[in-house]
Amino acid sequence: MDEILKNNIFVFNEDFINRNISISDDGLSTIIMLGEQNDVEKEIDNHKEKLNKVKANYDKVKKEDDKLSDENEISSPLNIKEKFLKTLKSEQGWAKRDSEIKGNANKSKVVFDVMVNKLSPLKVSDSEADLRKSFYETLELYKKSGNIETEYRDKIEPVVIPSDIDHSIVTLLSEEVKKIEFSELEQKIHETILEGKQRIVERTNEVFAVEKKNICPCCYQSVSDEYREYLITCINHVLNEDIKNFEERLQRTKLEEISFNTELYKTLDNEIITDIILAIQECNKTICKYNEYINQRLENIYTPISIAQLDLSAKIKDLNLQLKRLETNRLEFNKAIRERKKIKEKLDSINLKLALIETETFLGEYFDAKDKQNKLSNELKQLKDEKSSIEKEIEKLKDKKKNINISLDLINKLLSYVFLDSKRIKLETKNDKFILKSQGANVKPKDVSIGERNIIALCYFFVNSLKGREKQNCYTQESLYVIDDPVSSFDIDNRVETAEKFV
């Protein structure tokens, strides 16, 4: 058989009608679905059926989820959480015991997430009675150990000075400075120094040599440049390098007073603190006395000072003994604090174990309810996504249905040809649907006969067979049309005539 003819064989039978013609009711009129439009509509109906099932399932899950979100619902996480917190805040609960540990009048604050994180990993093997007995016995011991909060972390160091400090200072003060031969003016300068007026000489040198002034700072008389230079030379000769070196040695020998913040350590041992204060006072008196002698020697550099040793070394030794006693107390004090911290840690641990026993049921119920709520939330999200996906697919199918091109004019032309009346049976478009009209009026599906249905199907059959052909070549190709049984089911008025007209 010719290949072209093979592709142009068309069969009209009951199966064609069932596949391509659909009649439905929109309440007021008959809707006709033809061909591919009918297939798409069936797809839409299938998707709508799926959508209804998804919506029903979503509503069911949403109802369960809403129930778990209601704080008045006893199985909801919020309701269980409230019972959990109420137990912890009770007069016999964790918050009251924690305030007793801290010595506070008011109950401790209870933070849900914090308590859950602390209690969740705990395992308790002791009985509640044993834990309560241990808690209050340990609490009594803790209260007796005092109200210590922080350690003294800084080590108390001894005062360090050379062991021969007294001998060194006394020797230096008594040391003689080598005299040199002076001119008449230098002798007067030297005598002025010996009278204890060395500072006046030094100031004069500063005015003339450093500040470059020509006015005497003592008599306020002007001097010539030559005399000023001569005076500077004489002063420097008297105050020679050896003198300067000796002055520097005296300055380096000066001692700083001892300072110690006794306020920081009053809680350690007030008696030792008192002894330390007295010892420091004695040391600083001696230091001040030595410094006074050094200043005197600086003022009279050529005049040796002979004094007895003031026993500063022995006084520093006594002070260091007191500081060592205080350091021993500091170490013992810190040890006591660490022990007390261990007691508090034990109390906190027992308190948490008691709290777990008191709330373990609520904690388990809360996690179960929360897990269920999370699963429902995930399920709702999946159903919502599925619902959205089906709705989008339905919209795509509706768009596809709108774009299906069926030659309505040609179908109506054939119908008018069959019935010899353009108004007897006619299809009109409304909201992208084909509406069946008879004499211009809507027709209900129950009033559409099988014969009329088959005639509409036959008209669509011939129109559909021309699909894809150009208008001017519609009837140039050979085609084979097989008209099966449905012709016999045309209405008696149209049976023979219809067949003859199409043939």
Image: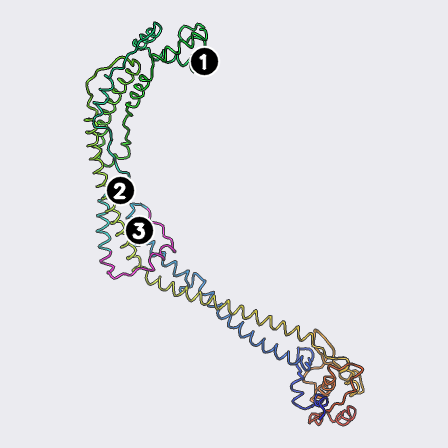
Question: Which labelled disc corresponds to residue 62?
Answer: none
In percent of width and height, residue 320 lies at 21, 31
The amino acid pointed to by label 3 is Lys
User: Mark 3 to mark 1: distance in Å?
Assistant: 83 Å
Asked if the stretch drawn in magenta spans residue 184, the answer is no
- SS at mark 1 in the image: loop
Please state if 47 lies on the left or on the right of 432 as rendered. left
Q: How far apart are marks 1 and 2 (CA)?
A: 67 Å
**Vertical arrangement, residue 78 with respect to residue 214, above or below:** below
Residue 490 in the image, given as x and y percentages of width and height: 72, 92
* Viewer-closest of 258 and 200: 200
- The mark closer to the camera, 3 or 1, is 1
What residue is pinned by disc 1? 212
Task: Give 100 or 20, whichever is nearer the viewer.
Answer: 20
Residue 314 in picture, x, y percent from top left: 18, 26
Q: Which is more N-terminal, label 1 or label 3?
A: 3
Label 3: state its secondary structure.
helix
* Magenta residues (range): 106-131
Q: Going by the image, does 405 lie left or right of 196?
A: right
Density class for disc 3 (Cα within 10 Å; few <14, some 14-19, many ≥20) is many
121 falls in the magenta region: yes
Judging from the image, what secondary structure is the residue with disc 2 in? loop
Q: Inspect the image, locate mark 2, and give the three-letter code of the amino acid beneath it.
A: Ile
Q: Mark 2 points at which residue?
A: 148
Residue drawn 27% across and 18% down?
Answer: 294
Quadrant the C terminus occupies? bottom right
Q: Mark 3 points at which residue?
A: 96
Give yes or no for contact between labels 1 and 2 (Cβ–Cβ under 8 Å): no
Q: What's the residue type where badge 1 is placed?
A: Lys
* Coordinates of residue 60 in the picture (x, y in percent): 49, 71
Q: In this view, does 71 lie to the left or right of 299?
A: right
Report whether 264 appears left or right of 111.
left
